[in-house]
Image (tube, coloured by chain):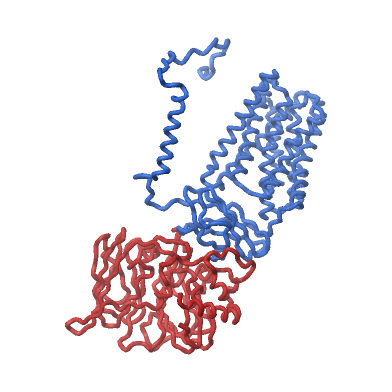
């Protein structure tokens, strides 16, 4: 934490700006609560900053802040035809992950993390994904997009110890996803086998501060209802560690909903509106809104620029999800302190 | 079906023959050694197991089954919840997060978050609970399992102080002591009526006790359900239910041998004792419900207890119909039956343990069971048709009916 001092200063400044009301109306949140210590032995009684998990993740746990801007272009080479070839290695592993401070979940992962790596390529690239299964159950990878039937991952479960190579051309451009398609699918998805799959248009998109967010949730007691909600796995992570963005700069979120059990999830930002490009498959048409609801598997590209500085919440507009971990804060600054 | 009748015993057999030929005593092995050796071996085995750890199949390759019980939720002031938890499972449990009404909430724990087997913790949650509405508190453990408990109707828990103790002393006196004493005032009446009417009132007593006994047993079993696993709720019920009549019965036999005939006073004291234990459990329940804000102490409830418990006094004096007990004896009997309500309410206000509540109710049920048995035997001696004489059968039914009808009033 090299930016610890700055973080504190931001927090103090944010505190002076006043509290940020939670649209749910059940209470408000303000940034001082973000500095909740690991023990929280004495809580501020009757304060309105208490809707929060206590403590911090164990050192070395999955870091949603790093994940947010990590895009995996694979190993790039060219085929004799001149077509770009991107090669990836994906390994299914059983791994216990921390989904909220102190709450461990027996996940099934791609490459040891939930969500799996964000696969990013350009339309027309040849993709070659070597998948090996080191888990204890059969798994597969099913990519959304256009590809041959035998590369679909739905009918070829890869048994433990076996491997499979998925190879196809990336199309169409947009924000997609990949996930395990082995039965029972519900369990294979909610145990953590999913990731974002971004195909850029050949001409590219305008330069922006890009982030990937998967709205996910965890049924930690296996009663077919979720206990923990988040974007990128860890409850309240981006509230405890606000995402710093620059005023007037274009931001782009590749948003994917993989929440199991609940019919819908949603994305709402405060103090702003975004351009909503559904599935990201069209560069022209968009909707201008601050709220989108998505079923499982739906995704979108969100573009926005902040006019004002200060902390702004973003969260699911299902208040229950927000209160169980799916809420975060953008900290908008004139210039980024880094 | 004559086979069902045992042949009449005319004479007691002189002496039981030995079970077999006396086994020859092994030379060189003293008696104490043969008695203790298995125990020593057992202790050594347990020590070795603890010291060197489990082997082979005993080594757990699966997550432990956690069992955390939220015993009590207090609302001491607006914006604060106090939750007591106990770990009744086989392994330590780590409290990771707390949710109130499906929202993560900050909280503090009075001690380590790792709760060892049978250890307790109290958590303080600054949650803005809403008067008159239900709330659910959920503890999420490190393995992601959840344990919940509900506050049915949120209302501020009264502080347990001098005023509380006074209130409950008064409540206990009203609900437990006064009605029993009023019931005792029936003594001149039951002494004056015909023998067949005394029998009727004795039958009535049996009816009352049957009702109370079943009620106590039901309460015991119900509370046993919320006893943390390790304390084995149902085993506690069996222990109290069967152990109590064994102990009291043995004392009775010993007294009979020392004093000759079983006195009616002994039966009356037994009844008072059984009712007292039942009332102790009842007091615990009232005190706890009040302290956790589950019930409001309405006049209706107190009136209900007055009527309900007055019949208990009648039950105590009826066996004394042929006696001339001293006033002090009667007072003591009344106190034995009624005062435990006060004691129970006091204990229940300070601490709630389903373990003790279960045990008290089970012991009460056992004691009442014994009393019913004693009264049954008394009847067998008193009248040829026993309880099945029409008037007596009507008495038993009437007793149960009275308890049922007055019980309607106390079901808060």
Give the tally of numbered discs: 0
Q: Position of residue A193 (x, y in %)?
A: 35, 66
Q: Residue B313, how many percent across, how many down?
A: 75, 35
Q: In this structure image, what is the colour of chain A? A: red
Answer above or below: position of A29 versus B47.
Answer: below
Residue nearest the observer in this picture, B239 or B297: B239
Quadrant placement of the C terminus of chain A: bottom left
Q: Is residue A22 visible?
A: no
Q: Is residue B60 left or right of residue A311?
A: left
Judged from this view, the residue extending furthest toward the left is A80
Chain B on-screen colour: blue
**Rendered view: A6 above or below A98:** below
Residue drawn at (63%, 27%) of the image: B249
Q: Nearer the viewer, residue B218 or B164?
A: B164
Q: Position of residue A317 (x, y in %)?
A: 52, 74
Identified at 42% across, 71% down, the residue is A63
| In-image side of B319 versus A288 (left or right) | right
């Amino acid at each position: 934490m090299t930016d610890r001092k700055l973080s504190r200063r931001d927090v103090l400044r944010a505190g002076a700006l006043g509290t940020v009301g939670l649209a749910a109306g059940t209470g408000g949140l303000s940034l001082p609560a973000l500095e909740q210590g690991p023990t929280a032995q004495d809580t501020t009684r009757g304060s309105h900053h208490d809707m929060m998990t206590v403590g911090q993740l164990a050192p070395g746990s999955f870091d949603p802040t790093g994940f947010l801007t990590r895009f995996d272009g694979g190993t790039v080479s060219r085929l004799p035809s001149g077509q770009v070839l991107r090669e990836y290695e994906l390994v299914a592993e059983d791994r216990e992950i921390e989904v909220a401070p102190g709450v461990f979940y027996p996940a099934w992962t791609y490459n040891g993390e939930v969500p799996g790596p964000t696969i990013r390529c350009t339309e027309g690239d040849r993709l070659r994904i070597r998948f090996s299964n080191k888990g204890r159950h059969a798994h597969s990878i099913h990519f959304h997009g256009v590809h041959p039937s035998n590369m679909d991952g739905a009918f070829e479960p890869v048994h433990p110890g076996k491997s499979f190579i998925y190879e196809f051309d990336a199309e169409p451009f947009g924000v997609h996803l990949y996930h395990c398609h082995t039965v029972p699918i519900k369990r294979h998805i909610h145990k953590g086998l999913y990731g974002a799959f971004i195909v850029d248009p050949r001409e590219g998109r305008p330069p922006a501060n890009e982030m990937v967010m998967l709205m996910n949730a965890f049924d930690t007691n296996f009663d077919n209802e979720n206990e923990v909600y988040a974007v990128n796995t860890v409850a309240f992570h981006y509230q405890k560690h606000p995402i710093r963005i620059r005023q007037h700069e274009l931001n782009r979120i590749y948003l994917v909903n993989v929440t199991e059990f609940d019919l819908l999830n949603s994305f709402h930002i405060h103090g702003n509106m975004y351009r909503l490009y559904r599935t990201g498959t069209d560069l022209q048409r968009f909707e201008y809104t601050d709220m989108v609801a998505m079923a499982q598997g739906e995704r979108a590209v969100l573009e926005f620029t902040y006019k004002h500085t200060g902390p702004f919440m973003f969260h699911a507009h299902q208040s229950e999800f927000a209160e169980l971990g799916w809420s975060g804060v953008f900290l908008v600054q004139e210039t980024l302190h880094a | 079906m004559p086979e069902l009748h045992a042949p009449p015993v005319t004479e007691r057999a002189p002496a039981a023959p030995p079970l077999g030929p006396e086994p020859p005593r092994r030379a060189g092995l003293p008696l104490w050694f043969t008695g203790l050796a298995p125990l020593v071996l057992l202790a050594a085995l347990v020590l070795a197991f603890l010291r060197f750890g489990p082997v082979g199949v005993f080594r757990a390759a699966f997550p432990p089954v956690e069992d955390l019980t939220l015993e009590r939720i207090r609302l001491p002031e607006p914006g604060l919840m106090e939750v007591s938890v106990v770990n009744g499972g086989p392994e330590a449990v780590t409290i990771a997060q707390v949710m109130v009404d499906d929202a993560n909430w900050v909280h503090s724990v009075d001690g380590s978050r790792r709760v060892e087997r049978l250890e307790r913790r109290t958590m303080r949650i600054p949650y803005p609970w809403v008067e008159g509405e239900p709330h659910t508190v959920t503890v999420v453990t490190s393995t992601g399992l959840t344990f919940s408990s509900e506050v049915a109707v949120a209302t501020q828990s009264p502080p347990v102080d001098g005023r509380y103790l006074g209130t409950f002393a008064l409540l206990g006196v009203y609900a437990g002591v006064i009605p029993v004493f009023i019931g005792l005032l029936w003594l001149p009446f039951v002494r004056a009526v015909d023998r067949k009417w005394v029998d009727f009132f004795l039958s009535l007593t049996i009816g009352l006790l049957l009702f109370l006994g079943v009620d106590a047993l039901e309460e015991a079993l119900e509370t046993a359900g919320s006893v943390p696993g390790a304390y084995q709720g149902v085993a506690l019920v069996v222990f109290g239910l069967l152990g109590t009549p064994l102990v009291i019965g043995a004392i009775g036999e010993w007294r009979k041998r020392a004093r000759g005939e079983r006195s009616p006073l002994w039966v009356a004291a037994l009844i008072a004792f059984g009712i007292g234990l039942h009332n102790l459990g009842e007091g615990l329940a009232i005190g706890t419900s009040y302290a956790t804000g589950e019930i409001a102490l309405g006049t209706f409830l107190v009136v209900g207890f007055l009527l309900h418990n007055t019949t208990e006094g009648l039950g105590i004096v009826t066996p004394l119909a042929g006696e001339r007990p001293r006033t002090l004896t009667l007072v003591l009997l009344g106190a034995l039956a009624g005062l435990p309500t006060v004691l129970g309410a006091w204990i229940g206000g300070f601490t709630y343990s389903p373990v003790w509540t279960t045990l008290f109710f089970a012991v009460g049920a056992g004691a009442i069971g014994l009393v019913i048995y004693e009264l049954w035997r008394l009847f067998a001696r008193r009248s040829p048709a026993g309880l099945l004489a029409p008037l007596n059968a009507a008495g038993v039914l009437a007793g149960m009916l009275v308890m049922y009808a007055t019980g309607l009033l106390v079901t808060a």
